């Protein structure tokens, strides 16, 4: 099963972010993490050929973009930027530490602390279930300060997430958020057919 995510060359940052969020949500929730997410324009080759063939063939001309009211001047690298910070007072004093390891993994999020996932025009504040009040409040303040300190767009959104209620976009930046389990669908024979399913979707 395949899900194609095709971005127009002139699509704006909001369309790209929302499109990716929807694609990841379909993959991990509706398709039980079984579908393969493919970016035909980026990877090219056979994947791009298959994409156009599914649509009945590639058009000679792609329709022009509808102009935005306030077009963004951000570069592609700006739009793709992300960083993860840990906010913890476990050492006895409050510290903000950037996590530079890549790829990001779910195991990096500690239930005892708060974390900040910084995107170009959105900042997530993830609060562990056992994080104390100082860590939670400080993480929110740091996130708000990012807007002025880093010259972010005035429309930058700050989203607070409690552990266990993360949205699809946040999850898409981490590996292992959509863990699979073996599920027996059963059949009339002695041998059962197994497939992986998204644990989160079963909850």
Image (tube, rainbow, N blue to C red):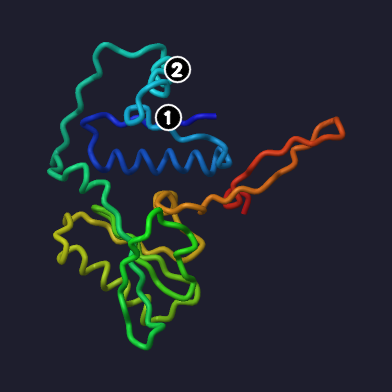
Q: CA distance from mark 2 to mark 1?
A: 10 Å
SS of the residue under disc 2: helix
Q: Give residue 115's quadrant in the image.
A: bottom left
Q: Dot 2, how many residues are within 10 Å of its Cα: few (below 14), some (14-19), or many (20+)?
A: few
Q: Is residue 52 above or below residue 187?
A: above
Which residue shows up at 43% across the image and 38% down it?
23
Are the residues at dot 2 and dot 1 in contact (C-beta closer than 8 Å)? Answer: yes
Q: Is residue 168 above or below residue 124?
A: above
Q: Give residue 63's quadrant in the image.
A: top left
Q: Dot 1, how many residues are within 10 Å of its Cα: few (below 14), some (14-19), or many (20+)?
A: some
Between 59 and 190, the one lying in front of the other is 190
Between 44 and 54, the one lying in front of the other is 44
**Between discs 2 and 1, the one toward the N terminus:** 1
- Mark 2, residue position: 54
| Direction from residue 145 to residue 40 in the image, left or right | right
Q: Which mark is residue 87?
A: none
SS of the residue under disc 1: strand
- Mark 1, residue position: 4
Q: Give residue 190's quadrant in the image.
A: top right
């Amino acid at each position: 099963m395949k899900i194609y995510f095709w971005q127009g060359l002139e699509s704006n940052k909001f369309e790209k972010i929302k499109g990716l969020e929807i694609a990841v949500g379909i993959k991990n929730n509706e398709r039980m993490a079984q579908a393969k997410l493919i970016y035909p324009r980026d990877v090219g080759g056979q994947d791009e050929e298959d994409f156009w063939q599914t649509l009945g063939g590639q058009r000679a001309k792609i329709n022009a973009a509808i102009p935005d009211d306030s077009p963004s001047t951000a570069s592609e690298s700006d739009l793709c930027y992300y960083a993860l910070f840990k906010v913890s007072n476990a050492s006895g004093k409050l510290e903000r530490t950037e996590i530079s390891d890549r790829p990001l993994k779910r195991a990096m999020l500690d239930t005892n602390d708060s974390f900040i996932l910084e995107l170009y025009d959105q900042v997530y504040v993830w609060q562990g279930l056992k994080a104390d009040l100082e860590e939670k409040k400080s993480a929110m303040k740091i996130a708000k300060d990012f807007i002025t300190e880093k010259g972010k767009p005035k429309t930058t959104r700050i989203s607070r997430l409690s552990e266990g209620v993360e949205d699809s976009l946040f999850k898409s930046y981490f590996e292992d958020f959509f863990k699979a389990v073996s599920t027996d669908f059963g059949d009339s024979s002695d041998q059962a057919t197994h497939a992986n399913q998204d644990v989160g979707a079963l909850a």
